[in-house]
Image (cartoon, grey):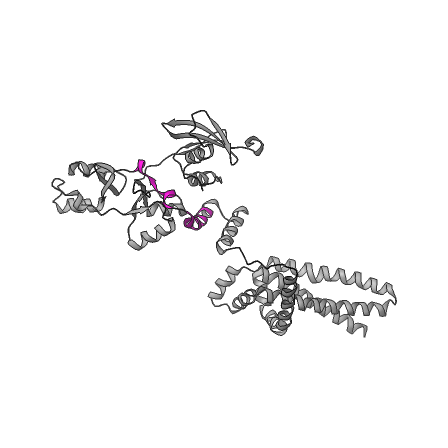
Amino acid sequence: MIIGILVTIIILICMSAFFSGSETALTAASRARMHQLEKDGNKRAGLVNKLISDREKLIGAILVGNNIVNILASILAAELFRQLIPGPLGVAIATAVMTLVVVVCAEMTPKTYAINRPDSMAMRVATPINWVVIAIGWVVAGAQVLVNGLLKLLGVSQPGDAVTAEDDIRGTIDLHHSEEGLDAKNRHRLVGALDLKDMTVEEVMIHRKNITMIDADQPADAIVRKALASPHTRLPLFRGDQEEIVGILHVKDLLRAIVGNNGKTSGLDILDICRDPWFIPETTAAEDQLDLFLKKRSHFALVVDEYGALQGLVTLEDILEEIVGDIRDEYDVVVRGVRPQEDGSVYVEGGVTIRDLNRAMGWELPDEEAVTIAGLVIHEAQTIPEPGQRFAFYGYRFDIARKSRNQITGLKVMPVREEQDA
Protein backbone atom coordinates (compact mmCIF):
# COMPACT_ATOMS: atom_id res chain seq x y z
CA MET A 1 0.00 0.00 0.00
CA ILE A 2 2.73 2.44 1.00
CA ILE A 3 4.83 1.57 -2.07
CA GLY A 4 1.79 2.10 -4.33
CA ILE A 5 1.15 5.54 -2.85
CA LEU A 6 4.82 6.48 -3.21
CA VAL A 7 4.93 5.41 -6.88
CA THR A 8 1.73 7.38 -7.55
CA ILE A 9 3.22 10.51 -5.92
CA ILE A 10 6.36 10.19 -8.07
CA ILE A 11 4.24 9.88 -11.21
CA LEU A 12 2.19 12.94 -10.22
CA ILE A 13 5.36 14.98 -9.54
CA CYS A 14 6.65 14.03 -13.00
CA MET A 15 3.34 15.17 -14.52
CA SER A 16 3.58 18.45 -12.61
CA ALA A 17 7.11 18.96 -13.93
CA PHE A 18 5.84 18.26 -17.45
CA PHE A 19 3.07 20.88 -17.12
CA SER A 20 5.44 23.49 -15.63
CA GLY A 21 8.10 23.00 -18.31
CA SER A 22 5.50 22.99 -21.08
CA GLU A 23 4.01 26.26 -19.90
CA THR A 24 7.41 27.96 -19.90
CA ALA A 25 8.48 26.50 -23.25
CA LEU A 26 5.26 27.40 -25.07
CA THR A 27 5.12 30.95 -23.70
CA ALA A 28 8.83 31.59 -24.39
CA ALA A 29 8.96 30.00 -27.86
CA SER A 30 9.80 32.38 -30.70
CA ARG A 31 6.68 32.98 -32.74
CA ALA A 32 8.78 34.18 -35.67
CA ARG A 33 10.84 30.97 -35.71
CA MET A 34 7.75 28.79 -35.31
CA HIS A 35 6.09 30.64 -38.19
CA GLN A 36 9.10 30.08 -40.44
CA LEU A 37 9.34 26.40 -39.50
CA GLU A 38 5.64 25.97 -40.21
CA LYS A 39 6.13 27.54 -43.65
CA ASP A 40 8.94 25.03 -44.22
CA GLY A 41 6.50 22.17 -43.55
CA ASN A 42 7.20 21.40 -39.87
CA LYS A 43 3.88 20.09 -38.50
CA ARG A 44 4.93 20.31 -34.86
CA ALA A 45 5.77 23.99 -35.30
CA GLY A 46 2.32 24.46 -36.82
CA LEU A 47 0.78 22.85 -33.73
CA VAL A 48 2.80 25.19 -31.49
CA ASN A 49 1.47 28.18 -33.44
CA LYS A 50 -2.07 26.86 -33.05
CA LEU A 51 -1.65 26.51 -29.28
CA ILE A 52 -0.07 29.92 -28.64
CA SER A 53 -2.60 31.67 -30.87
CA ASP A 54 -5.09 31.21 -28.01
CA ARG A 55 -2.93 31.84 -24.96
CA GLU A 56 -5.85 32.11 -22.52
CA LYS A 57 -7.08 28.63 -23.37
CA LEU A 58 -3.56 27.18 -23.39
CA ILE A 59 -2.47 28.63 -20.04
CA GLY A 60 -5.84 27.81 -18.50
CA ALA A 61 -5.64 24.14 -19.50
CA ILE A 62 -2.04 23.84 -18.23
CA LEU A 63 -2.94 25.50 -14.91
CA VAL A 64 -5.95 23.21 -14.40
CA GLY A 65 -3.89 20.11 -15.15
CA ASN A 66 -0.97 21.27 -12.99
CA ASN A 67 -3.15 22.12 -10.01
CA ILE A 68 -5.01 18.80 -10.21
CA VAL A 69 -1.79 16.74 -10.06
CA ASN A 70 -0.20 18.96 -7.37
CA ILE A 71 -3.23 18.82 -5.09
CA LEU A 72 -3.61 15.06 -5.58
CA ALA A 73 0.10 14.53 -4.88
CA SER A 74 -0.16 16.61 -1.68
CA ILE A 75 -3.18 14.63 -0.47
CA LEU A 76 -1.44 11.32 -1.09
CA ALA A 77 1.76 12.56 0.59
CA ALA A 78 -0.24 13.58 3.65
CA GLU A 79 -1.82 10.12 3.78
CA LEU A 80 1.57 8.44 3.32
CA PHE A 81 3.22 10.34 6.16
CA ARG A 82 0.14 9.91 8.37
CA GLN A 83 0.62 6.15 8.07
CA LEU A 84 4.36 6.40 8.75
CA ILE A 85 4.20 9.07 11.50
CA PRO A 86 0.74 9.29 13.11
CA GLY A 87 -0.54 12.64 14.34
CA PRO A 88 0.06 16.33 13.41
CA LEU A 89 3.81 15.78 13.07
CA GLY A 90 3.27 13.56 10.01
CA VAL A 91 1.14 16.23 8.31
CA ALA A 92 3.78 18.88 9.03
CA ILE A 93 6.58 16.73 7.62
CA ALA A 94 4.46 15.92 4.54
CA THR A 95 3.87 19.64 3.95
CA ALA A 96 7.58 20.48 4.24
CA VAL A 97 8.72 17.59 2.04
CA MET A 98 6.11 18.19 -0.67
CA THR A 99 6.87 21.93 -0.75
CA LEU A 100 10.57 21.22 -1.30
CA VAL A 101 9.94 18.50 -3.89
CA VAL A 102 7.38 20.55 -5.86
CA VAL A 103 9.51 23.72 -5.89
CA VAL A 104 12.76 22.00 -6.86
CA CYS A 105 11.62 19.05 -8.98
CA ALA A 106 8.29 20.21 -10.42
CA GLU A 107 8.91 23.96 -10.86
CA MET A 108 12.49 25.24 -10.91
CA THR A 109 14.19 22.34 -12.71
CA PRO A 110 11.75 21.91 -15.64
CA LYS A 111 11.29 25.67 -16.07
CA THR A 112 15.05 26.30 -16.09
CA TYR A 113 15.48 23.57 -18.69
CA ALA A 114 12.60 24.95 -20.80
CA ILE A 115 13.77 28.57 -20.72
CA ASN A 116 17.13 27.50 -22.16
CA ARG A 117 15.56 25.41 -24.96
CA PRO A 118 12.13 26.97 -25.54
CA ASP A 119 11.73 26.25 -29.26
CA SER A 120 12.84 22.62 -29.28
CA MET A 121 10.94 21.74 -26.10
CA ALA A 122 7.79 23.55 -27.29
CA MET A 123 7.70 21.35 -30.39
CA ARG A 124 8.24 18.19 -28.33
CA VAL A 125 5.41 18.92 -25.86
CA ALA A 126 2.96 20.39 -28.38
CA THR A 127 1.14 17.13 -29.14
CA PRO A 128 0.43 15.96 -25.55
CA ILE A 129 -0.46 19.49 -24.45
CA ASN A 130 -2.87 19.73 -27.38
CA TRP A 131 -4.58 16.57 -26.06
CA VAL A 132 -4.86 18.21 -22.63
CA VAL A 133 -6.34 21.38 -24.12
CA ILE A 134 -8.93 19.34 -26.04
CA ALA A 135 -9.77 17.20 -23.00
CA ILE A 136 -10.30 19.99 -20.47
CA GLY A 137 -10.99 22.92 -22.78
CA TRP A 138 -14.62 23.01 -21.64
CA VAL A 139 -13.48 23.43 -18.02
CA VAL A 140 -11.23 26.34 -19.00
CA ALA A 141 -14.04 27.98 -21.01
CA GLY A 142 -16.39 27.80 -18.03
CA ALA A 143 -13.74 29.15 -15.66
CA GLN A 144 -12.99 32.02 -18.05
CA VAL A 145 -16.66 33.02 -18.08
CA LEU A 146 -16.60 33.17 -14.27
CA VAL A 147 -13.35 35.17 -14.30
CA ASN A 148 -14.67 37.71 -16.82
CA GLY A 149 -17.88 38.07 -14.79
CA LEU A 150 -15.93 38.64 -11.59
CA LEU A 151 -13.68 41.24 -13.24
CA LYS A 152 -16.74 43.01 -14.62
CA LEU A 153 -18.32 43.14 -11.15
CA LEU A 154 -15.10 44.63 -9.78
CA GLY A 155 -15.11 47.24 -12.57
CA VAL A 156 -11.84 46.01 -14.07
CA SER A 157 -11.63 46.37 -17.84
CA GLN A 158 -9.46 44.15 -20.00
CA PRO A 159 -7.29 46.35 -22.21
CA GLY A 160 -6.34 45.16 -25.66
CA ASP A 161 -2.80 44.44 -26.68
CA ALA A 162 -1.29 47.88 -27.39
CA VAL A 163 2.02 46.49 -28.65
CA THR A 164 2.16 46.58 -32.44
CA ALA A 165 4.24 44.27 -34.61
CA GLU A 166 6.54 47.20 -35.37
CA ASP A 167 7.11 47.88 -31.65
CA ASP A 168 7.85 44.20 -31.15
CA ILE A 169 10.42 44.21 -33.97
CA ARG A 170 12.05 47.41 -32.70
CA GLY A 171 12.29 45.96 -29.21
CA THR A 172 13.87 42.77 -30.53
CA ILE A 173 16.42 44.73 -32.58
CA ASP A 174 17.37 46.97 -29.63
CA LEU A 175 17.59 43.98 -27.30
CA HIS A 176 19.98 42.08 -29.57
CA HIS A 177 22.00 45.26 -30.13
CA SER A 178 22.33 45.89 -26.38
CA GLU A 179 23.46 42.29 -25.91
CA GLU A 180 26.04 42.79 -28.70
CA GLY A 181 24.32 40.20 -30.87
CA LEU A 182 23.72 42.82 -33.57
CA ASP A 183 26.28 45.41 -34.65
CA ALA A 184 25.46 49.10 -35.05
CA LYS A 185 25.44 49.04 -38.87
CA ASN A 186 22.92 46.24 -39.12
CA ARG A 187 20.80 47.83 -36.38
CA HIS A 188 20.69 51.12 -38.33
CA ARG A 189 19.64 49.28 -41.49
CA LEU A 190 16.82 47.40 -39.79
CA VAL A 191 15.56 50.39 -37.81
CA GLY A 192 15.99 52.68 -40.83
CA ALA A 193 13.54 50.57 -42.82
CA LEU A 194 10.98 50.94 -40.01
CA ASP A 195 11.60 54.69 -39.70
CA LEU A 196 10.73 55.47 -43.32
CA LYS A 197 7.00 55.69 -42.67
CA ASP A 198 7.59 58.36 -40.00
CA MET A 199 9.80 60.50 -42.24
CA THR A 200 8.97 63.03 -44.93
CA VAL A 201 10.99 63.85 -48.02
CA GLU A 202 11.84 67.18 -46.36
CA GLU A 203 14.01 65.25 -43.90
CA VAL A 204 16.02 63.40 -46.55
CA MET A 205 16.11 65.89 -49.43
CA ILE A 206 19.10 67.87 -50.65
CA HIS A 207 18.47 71.54 -49.82
CA ARG A 208 18.09 73.93 -52.74
CA LYS A 209 21.29 75.81 -51.86
CA ASN A 210 23.26 72.60 -52.44
CA ILE A 211 21.66 71.76 -55.81
CA THR A 212 23.80 72.00 -58.93
CA MET A 213 21.70 73.82 -61.55
CA ILE A 214 22.40 74.99 -65.08
CA ASP A 215 21.02 78.07 -66.82
CA ALA A 216 19.07 76.85 -69.84
CA ASP A 217 19.76 80.15 -71.69
CA GLN A 218 23.49 79.40 -71.90
CA PRO A 219 24.96 78.08 -75.17
CA ALA A 220 24.78 74.35 -75.74
CA ASP A 221 28.58 74.00 -75.53
CA ALA A 222 28.66 75.61 -72.08
CA ILE A 223 25.79 73.42 -70.83
CA VAL A 224 27.55 70.27 -72.04
CA ARG A 225 30.81 71.24 -70.31
CA LYS A 226 29.05 71.94 -67.01
CA ALA A 227 27.03 68.74 -67.22
CA LEU A 228 30.14 66.60 -67.84
CA ALA A 229 32.06 68.38 -65.07
CA SER A 230 29.32 67.68 -62.53
CA PRO A 231 29.45 64.52 -60.35
CA HIS A 232 25.68 64.13 -60.88
CA THR A 233 23.91 62.40 -63.76
CA ARG A 234 20.65 64.40 -63.47
CA LEU A 235 20.77 68.19 -63.46
CA PRO A 236 17.87 70.68 -63.20
CA LEU A 237 17.80 73.42 -65.83
CA PHE A 238 16.28 76.80 -64.98
CA ARG A 239 15.43 79.85 -67.02
CA GLY A 240 15.70 83.34 -65.57
CA ASP A 241 15.00 82.55 -61.91
CA GLN A 242 16.33 79.40 -60.25
CA GLU A 243 12.80 78.76 -59.00
CA GLU A 244 11.71 78.29 -62.64
CA ILE A 245 12.84 74.76 -63.41
CA VAL A 246 12.15 74.00 -67.07
CA GLY A 247 13.61 70.51 -67.39
CA ILE A 248 15.88 67.79 -66.02
CA LEU A 249 18.94 67.02 -68.09
CA HIS A 250 20.12 63.41 -67.89
CA VAL A 251 23.76 62.98 -68.91
CA LYS A 252 23.00 59.73 -70.77
CA ASP A 253 20.35 61.49 -72.85
CA LEU A 254 22.85 64.26 -73.55
CA LEU A 255 25.53 61.83 -74.72
CA ARG A 256 23.06 60.00 -76.98
CA ALA A 257 22.09 63.33 -78.54
CA ILE A 258 25.75 64.27 -79.09
CA VAL A 259 26.47 60.91 -80.76
CA GLY A 260 23.36 61.39 -82.91
CA ASN A 261 24.72 64.82 -83.88
CA ASN A 262 27.97 63.32 -85.22
CA GLY A 263 29.80 64.15 -81.96
CA LYS A 264 29.09 67.86 -82.24
CA THR A 265 27.60 69.93 -79.39
CA SER A 266 26.78 72.98 -81.42
CA GLY A 267 23.24 73.18 -82.65
CA LEU A 268 21.84 70.89 -79.96
CA ASP A 269 18.41 71.79 -78.59
CA ILE A 270 19.08 71.12 -74.90
CA LEU A 271 15.47 71.65 -73.81
CA ASP A 272 14.34 69.09 -76.37
CA ILE A 273 16.69 66.56 -74.73
CA CYS A 274 15.51 67.34 -71.21
CA ARG A 275 12.90 65.35 -69.32
CA ASP A 276 9.89 66.94 -67.65
CA PRO A 277 10.51 67.88 -64.00
CA TRP A 278 8.57 65.98 -61.34
CA PHE A 279 7.44 68.15 -58.44
CA ILE A 280 6.35 66.65 -55.11
CA PRO A 281 5.21 68.31 -51.86
CA GLU A 282 7.66 68.41 -48.96
CA THR A 283 5.12 66.67 -46.72
CA THR A 284 5.22 63.44 -48.78
CA ALA A 285 6.12 60.45 -46.60
CA ALA A 286 9.52 58.97 -47.50
CA GLU A 287 8.00 55.50 -47.65
CA ASP A 288 5.29 56.66 -50.07
CA GLN A 289 7.88 58.41 -52.23
CA LEU A 290 9.97 55.24 -52.36
CA ASP A 291 6.91 53.40 -53.68
CA LEU A 292 6.30 56.16 -56.23
CA PHE A 293 9.90 56.03 -57.44
CA LEU A 294 9.60 52.29 -58.01
CA LYS A 295 6.16 52.59 -59.63
CA LYS A 296 7.11 55.40 -62.03
CA ARG A 297 10.60 53.98 -62.60
CA SER A 298 11.99 57.44 -61.97
CA HIS A 299 14.75 58.25 -59.48
CA PHE A 300 14.62 62.05 -59.24
CA ALA A 301 12.02 64.53 -57.94
CA LEU A 302 11.98 68.20 -57.01
CA VAL A 303 10.51 69.14 -53.62
CA VAL A 304 8.28 72.22 -53.25
CA ASP A 305 6.49 73.76 -50.27
CA GLU A 306 2.80 74.61 -49.97
CA TYR A 307 3.35 77.80 -52.00
CA GLY A 308 5.08 75.97 -54.83
CA ALA A 309 8.51 77.36 -53.96
CA LEU A 310 11.46 75.05 -54.62
CA GLN A 311 12.87 73.59 -51.39
CA GLY A 312 15.22 70.92 -52.67
CA LEU A 313 15.41 67.63 -54.50
CA VAL A 314 15.19 64.00 -53.48
CA THR A 315 16.42 60.89 -55.25
CA LEU A 316 15.87 57.18 -54.81
CA GLU A 317 19.41 56.97 -53.49
CA ASP A 318 18.67 59.55 -50.76
CA ILE A 319 15.83 57.40 -49.42
CA LEU A 320 17.77 54.14 -49.68
CA GLU A 321 20.65 55.74 -47.77
CA GLU A 322 18.29 56.18 -44.81
CA ILE A 323 18.21 52.38 -44.65
CA VAL A 324 21.66 51.20 -45.72
CA GLY A 325 23.76 54.26 -44.88
CA ASP A 326 25.94 56.28 -47.24
CA ILE A 327 26.10 54.96 -50.82
CA ARG A 328 29.21 56.38 -52.46
CA ASP A 329 30.80 55.82 -55.82
CA GLU A 330 33.96 57.12 -57.50
CA TYR A 331 32.21 60.35 -58.51
CA ASP A 332 30.77 61.26 -55.11
CA VAL A 333 32.15 64.27 -53.29
CA VAL A 334 32.99 63.26 -49.72
CA VAL A 335 31.50 65.73 -47.26
CA ARG A 336 33.33 65.85 -43.95
CA GLY A 337 30.66 67.31 -41.75
CA VAL A 338 31.39 65.36 -38.56
CA ARG A 339 34.89 65.48 -37.04
CA PRO A 340 35.52 63.93 -33.59
CA GLN A 341 38.04 65.86 -31.45
CA GLU A 342 40.62 64.61 -28.95
CA ASP A 343 38.73 66.09 -25.98
CA GLY A 344 35.69 63.91 -26.68
CA SER A 345 33.73 66.62 -28.45
CA VAL A 346 32.63 66.55 -32.08
CA TYR A 347 32.93 69.41 -34.54
CA VAL A 348 29.81 69.44 -36.69
CA GLU A 349 28.91 71.56 -39.70
CA GLY A 350 25.52 73.22 -39.25
CA GLY A 351 23.97 71.55 -42.29
CA VAL A 352 24.61 68.00 -41.04
CA THR A 353 21.33 66.23 -40.38
CA ILE A 354 20.53 65.02 -36.89
CA ARG A 355 20.00 61.48 -38.18
CA ASP A 356 23.47 61.42 -39.78
CA LEU A 357 25.07 62.73 -36.58
CA ASN A 358 23.21 60.15 -34.47
CA ARG A 359 24.34 57.38 -36.81
CA ALA A 360 27.94 58.56 -36.89
CA MET A 361 28.28 58.94 -33.11
CA GLY A 362 25.69 56.50 -31.76
CA TRP A 363 23.77 59.40 -30.14
CA GLU A 364 20.03 59.83 -29.68
CA LEU A 365 19.36 63.51 -30.35
CA PRO A 366 15.67 64.07 -31.21
CA ASP A 367 14.81 64.90 -34.81
CA GLU A 368 11.08 65.58 -34.49
CA GLU A 369 11.35 69.40 -34.44
CA ALA A 370 14.32 69.98 -36.76
CA VAL A 371 16.19 68.25 -39.57
CA THR A 372 19.72 69.64 -39.14
CA ILE A 373 21.83 70.09 -36.03
CA ALA A 374 21.80 73.87 -36.56
CA GLY A 375 18.00 73.80 -36.75
CA LEU A 376 17.83 71.87 -33.48
CA VAL A 377 19.93 74.48 -31.68
CA ILE A 378 17.84 77.34 -33.06
CA HIS A 379 14.61 75.55 -32.11
CA GLU A 380 15.74 74.96 -28.54
CA ALA A 381 17.39 78.37 -28.09
CA GLN A 382 14.38 80.20 -29.61
CA THR A 383 16.86 82.64 -31.15
CA ILE A 384 19.68 82.73 -33.69
CA PRO A 385 22.82 82.25 -31.57
CA GLU A 386 26.07 84.14 -31.96
CA PRO A 387 29.55 82.55 -32.13
CA GLY A 388 30.85 81.88 -28.63
CA GLN A 389 27.45 81.15 -27.11
CA ARG A 390 26.91 77.84 -25.34
CA PHE A 391 23.74 75.81 -24.81
CA ALA A 392 23.02 72.53 -23.02
CA PHE A 393 20.00 70.32 -23.61
CA TYR A 394 19.14 66.62 -24.14
CA GLY A 395 22.36 65.68 -22.31
CA TYR A 396 24.67 67.46 -24.78
CA ARG A 397 26.54 70.78 -24.81
CA PHE A 398 26.49 72.91 -27.97
CA ASP A 399 29.18 75.57 -28.53
CA ILE A 400 28.51 77.87 -31.48
CA ALA A 401 31.75 78.13 -33.50
CA ARG A 402 30.84 79.83 -36.78
CA LYS A 403 27.94 81.72 -38.27
CA SER A 404 27.24 83.12 -41.74
CA ARG A 405 24.51 85.75 -41.80
CA ASN A 406 21.60 84.07 -40.05
CA GLN A 407 22.88 80.53 -40.48
CA ILE A 408 24.93 78.47 -38.01
CA THR A 409 27.70 76.94 -40.10
CA GLY A 410 29.78 75.24 -37.42
CA LEU A 411 29.43 74.11 -33.81
CA LYS A 412 31.07 71.83 -31.30
CA VAL A 413 28.94 69.21 -29.57
CA MET A 414 29.88 67.21 -26.49
CA PRO A 415 27.91 64.79 -24.28
CA VAL A 416 27.66 66.06 -20.69
CA ARG A 417 26.57 64.53 -17.41
CA GLU A 418 23.09 65.33 -16.10
CA GLU A 419 24.39 67.58 -13.31
CA GLN A 420 26.43 69.59 -15.85
CA ASP A 421 23.36 69.88 -18.09
CA ALA A 422 21.31 71.22 -15.18
In the image shown, does 313 or 234 lie closer to the viewer? 313
Instruction: Tell me if I can see residue 278 in this picture.
Output: yes
In the image shown, does 185 or 417 lie closer to the viewer? 417
Which quarter of the picture shows residue 201? Answer: top left
Quarter of the figure that contains the C terminus: top right
Look at the image and say whether residue 390 sits in the magenta stretch.
no
> Where residue 395 sits: x, y (%)?
53, 35
> Where residue 184 sits: x, y (%)?
47, 44
- Say which residue appears at 47% left-offset and 38% top-offset: 361
Residue 15, placed above or below residue 393: below
Q: Main secondary structure of the magenta part?
A: helix
- Say which residue appears at 70% left-offset and 69% top-offset: 68
Q: How many marks?
A: 0
Farthest-out residue, top: 388
- Residue span colored magenta: 187-211
In the image shown, does 194 or 244 lie closer to the viewer? 244
In the image shown, does 404 or 169 lie closer to the viewer? 404
> Where residue 116 sits: x, y (%)?
60, 57
Relative horizontal placement of residue 357, taking residue 58 as reference (left or right): left
Quarter of the figure that contains the N terminus: bottom right
Residue 171, placed above or below residue 35: above
